[in-house]
Image (tube, rainbow, N blue to C red):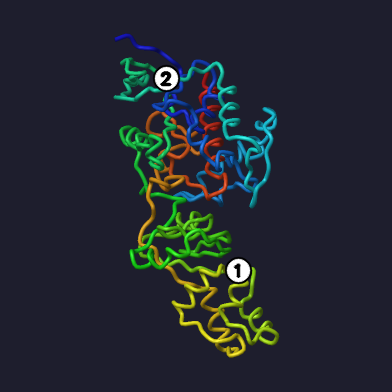
Amino acid sequence: MTEHAVQTLILGAGAAGLMCAAHAGPDVVVVDHAKAPGEKIRISGGGRCNFTNMYAGADNFLSQNPHFAKSALNRYSQWDFLDLVQRHGIAWHEKTLGQLFCDGSAKEIIAMLLAEITPAELWLRTEVGEIRHDGSAFHVALAKEGRAMQVRAANLVVATGGKSIPKMGATGIGYRIAEQFGHSLTETRPALVPLTFNEEQKTAFQPLAGNAVPTRIACNGASFDEAMLFTHRGLSGPAILQISSFWREGDRLSVHLCPDLSFYDTLRARRQGDGAKALTTVLADHLPRALVLHLAALWGLSGNLGDQSDRALRALSDRLEDWGLTPTSSEGYRTAEVTLGGVATDGVSSKTMESQHLPGLYLIGEVMDVTGWLGGYNFQWAWSSAVAAGRAIAGRG
């Protein structure tokens, strides 16, 4: 079997892989088992791709080493990527909390990246087999559209992503490659994922499905002020996806409903003019009625607002500001937006993303133990880590 020689072989044609190819210099081949490049980009942000966040910084990422992401993020920031987007004439807007989206379609970001990687080659429908290193180069067995072949590469870039959304082909192969060449892994688990409950709680939440409410959700020292959504399986919405990265099985969530509203002050003020109204009727002016009925049954709320003493209103307010919920699990990798954990940072250069165990091996994007918050942060890590690796490879000639 003949061996195809290239300078750089990139495994994965997602956000990180394509971005790296755009910066890695000449003689680059990108391979992916999918039928099309950038599939996660295509479905992201409801099809409009939340491609970065105006506030992206190392504090928005989880890692065993909280400082690891700083170098790459500082050297290729959200403003650098936004400049690229604007140079390609892609219209964009800020949706909320610094989240930047395409006005049109996420396919524009994919088209931009494909334009940027020219003249790199892109091999789709290509499966990766055995990988070995002979002391001077990598030898990778591939099956390109069913045809076996070998590639010899001076540099190997692992941009294969994590385990999230297996229906799109996620396999965790990047972790196996990293371990093969001496890297350790931190625990991996689904992140930015809806949370689920036991059957009793799930049944109780059924009438609430589809209702959303503004919340402040706290767990293990982290808290997020965003919407919480009730589903047929449990809880979702931005606040839940955010806190899922900090939650562990058995942990209690503290849910502060409508954090911008003081229930005690509001109910006390309304007691004078609306005292004859049912307490639940007044609460339903501020919360979804289905949620009010659920809480009324749960906490035994009854009577008119005028019947409630200051002490009773304070007690109710305290409950609404610290509603304790304990999920039993998450929806898992099936719906998780990213994978928490991954290749341990202590074996990788934060400046170049090159392995400290094997020169010429680079690990970028989601495969690393760097996980961003919801809102474009994980894409920014993909861009930043990819550029760090690409520039290091190009700089070597």
Give x and y (percent) for residue 360: 43, 26
> Sequence order check: which comes first, mark 1 or mark 2?
2
Residue at the location (51% across, 84% down)? Answer: 302
Left or right, 88 with reference to 217: right
- Neighbour class for label 2 at 10 Å: few (<14), some, many (≥20)? some
Q: Could you say which is closer to the camera, residue 299 or residue 64?
A: 299
- Neighbour class for label 1 at 10 Å: few (<14), some, many (≥20)? some
Give x and y (percent) for residue 151: 37, 16
Q: CA distance from mark 1 to mark 2?
A: 55 Å
Give x and y (percent) for residue 108: 60, 30
Q: Which of the two discs, 1 and 2, sits closer to the camera? A: 1
Please tell me whether mark 1 sits on a helix, a strand or a loop.
loop
Residue at the location (54% across, 20% down)? Answer: 25
Considering only vertical position in the picture, is 172 above or below 148?
below
Amino acid under label 2? Ala
Residue at the location (38% across, 45% down)? Answer: 334
Q: Quadrant of residue 9?
A: top left
Q: Is residue 360 visible?
A: no
Q: Quadrant of residue 198?
A: bottom left
Q: Quadrant of the N terminus?
A: top left
Left or right, 282 with reference to 13: right
Please tell me whether mark 2 sits on a helix, a strand or a loop.
strand
Kindly identify which numbered label has been placed on residue 259: 1
Total marks shown come to 2
Return the residue at label 2. Answer: 154
Q: Could you say which is closer to the camera, residue 247 or residue 157?
A: 247
Q: Could you say which is closer to the camera, residue 63 or residue 273?
A: 273
Considering only vertical position in the picture, is 284 above or below 128?
below
Amino acid under label 1? Pro
Q: Is residue 226 visible?
A: yes
Left or right, 33 with reference to 113: left
